[in-house]
Amino acid sequence: MRYYKLSALMLALVLLVSLGACKPAAADPTDQPTEGAAETVPPTEEPTQEPTNKPAETETIAPPLDMRLAVLSGPTGIGAAKLLDNIDNDQSALLGAGNYSYKIYTDNSELVAGLTNGEIDIATMASNVAVNLYNKTDGGVKIIAVGTLGVLHILEGGGGTSINSVEDLRGKTIYSAGEGANPEYILRYLLQESGLEIGTDVEVVFADATEISAKLLSGEIECAMLPVPAATAAIAKSEGQVRAAIDVTEAWDALETGSQVIMTAVVARAEFLESHPESVNLFLRDYEASIDYVNNNIDDAAELVAGYGLTPSAAIAKLAIPQCHLAFIAGNDMMSAISDYLIALYAIDPASVGGSLPDDSIYYTAS
């Protein structure tokens, strides 16, 4: 009897141990489910990584560049003709980086307004206007390159051949376009340095270029100073009665004062330049290539120039391009060339450069 009681007790103990062995063990957090095993429900603790609802810092893409170029119609814009063509045909170095657009303007005042209100980033404009804008905006623009030297020519009408030097202007009345702008100051400097006094040795009458051309063609006036392509057009229409008597750029150089005529400057808004210096450098590369193309491919370039309305016709453009003295100057060479020219203008009339010569901060020389 005692045997059975002991057996029953042993059986109860075995059952108790068996039940304890069937109780699930606590899961080891380092255990990984074996292949084919059902995944366990993840714990409700906080995730160790932040949600990736925005690109990682290394994948951030810079906003597209939006460069807005302004080109002044006439000789100031002729050197940019190939650049405009490259933009239209997706061949510019800057294309693909964003929106590279351009607009052609007819007056410097439009460029001044666009640069001041931030609608224009880079512009080709009259050099003295660029300096005035720099002074007016307390350094809001910088000159980044030179595009054109001199485009002025003194013409003799009536089939005459008596004017061949500045000295030959003594006793004459000169009709000139560009009062209050580069042409006036250049003419005054040229006459002064040649020993001719306005009002005593020569008379100067300022008028609109269209009016001057008409009077030359009609024989009403004998002598005039006009810029290319207006000068070129007057000669072409005159049937031999109007000729280019003096290239003003060459006459200035003959004075050997150490300065040279710089009529066109390329400027950039200082804020844009600071934000996109590499893009501005690419633009300068494009602009230099454009000037080189226009100078060395006159026939094809003339078609582009006329096509963009920079001159009245391709025939006029073909004659005008060699007379424009197109030149690309940047960096320290540009700084030296323009500063000497501005000193000459300031000597004639401080108002020509806004009342004071600019400091060196006006020049961008890091290209």
Image: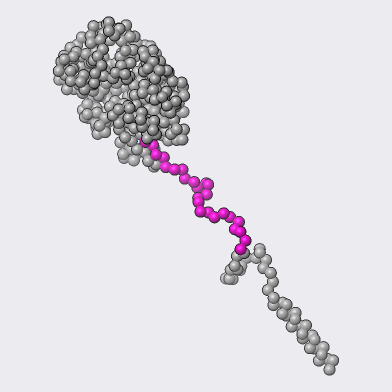
Residue 344: where, in percent of width, then height?
38, 14
Which of the pair 258/203 is nearer the observer?
203
- The residue most toward the right is 2
- The residue most toward the bottom is 1
Tell me what residue is drawn at x 50 percent, y 50 percent: 55
Q: Is residue 111 visible?
A: yes
Tell me what residue is drawn at x 42 percent, y 23 percent: 135
Q: Is residue 277 visible?
A: no
Residue 364: where, in percent of width, then height?
44, 27
The answer to whether 59 is drawn above or below residue 314 in the figure is below
Query: Which region is colored magenta?
Result: 44-68
Residue 345, by quadrant, is top left
Q: Quadrant of the C terminus?
A: top left
Residue 334, by quadrant, is top left
Residue 186, by quadrant, is top left
78 horizontally vs 241: left or right: right
Tell me what residue is drawn at x 31 percent, y 35 percent: 103
Residue 16: where, in percent of width, then height?
75, 81
Is 16 covered by the magenta stretch? no
Q: Quadrant of the N terminus?
A: bottom right
Which of the pair 114/254 is nearer the observer?
114
Total numbered labels placed on residues in the image: 0
Which of the pair 65/248 is nearer the observer?
65
Tell me what residue is drawn at x 69 percent, y 69 percent: 26
Residue 210: where, in percent of width, then height?
21, 22
Is 63 covered by the magenta stretch? yes
